[in-house]
Image (cartoon, helix red, strand yellow):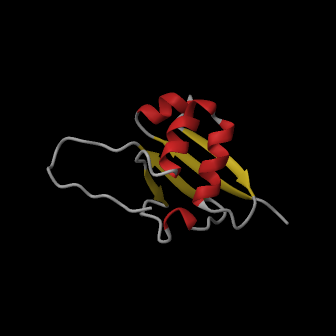
Amino acid sequence: MSRILVKVKYYAWLASLAGTSEDLLEVQPGVSIEDVLKLLSKMKPSLSKVIDKALKGEAELVILHNLKHPAEGLKTKLSNNDVLEILPPMSGGTSALLKANY
């Protein structure tokens, strides 16, 4: 079975931890966002603590899939050339808070 390409973009201090602003991953078809996060945790020890905490619900990360909130949360399946964007929670500006439940 052929593999698919998924681009992962990191923002703010996550890019500093990752040592790059983006990675291009070659993964198996049918992989979920959660699977990619677990893979990133293993590939990038500098990100493992924050990703592992987020997966356990102990920390927040904003995850966008092709510029939208994932339809099925972390269980959303990825396709070839999909883009994941990982952002730390932001503060300031407006008093309204938008929180996606993963």
User: What residue is drawn where x is 51% and y is 50%?
Assistant: 56
User: In the rendered image of this protein, does residue 75 appear above or below residue 36?
Assistant: below
Residue 37: horizontal and vertical position, in percent? 59, 50
Corner quadrant of residue 29: bottom right
Q: Tell me where residue 13 appears, x and y as whole percent.
A: 42, 32
Extreme residue toward the bottom, this view: 71
Q: Is residue 59 left or right of residue 43?
A: left
Above/below status of 39 relative to 29: above
Quick one: 31 or 5, which is closer to the camera? 31
- Coordinates of residue 94 in the picture (x, y in percent): 15, 49
Q: Is residue 25 left or right of residue 12?
A: right
Which quadrant of the structure image shows residue 100?
bottom left
- Labels in figure, total: 0
x 43%, y 59%: residue: 67
Residue nearest the observer in this picture, 66 or 101:
101
Tell me where residue 11 appears, x and y as whole percent.
Answer: 43, 39
Q: Residue at x 68, y 62 (%)?
A: 31
- Would residue 91 be found to the left or right of residue 58 on screen? left
- Is the residue 79 above or below the residue 34 in the image? below
Give whichever of 80, 44 is nearer the camera.
44
Query: Which residue shows up at 45% across the image and 61% down it?
Result: 102
**On-image quarter of the N terminus:** bottom right
Pick out the residue farthest to the right.
1
Whether 70 is drawn above or below 37: the answer is below
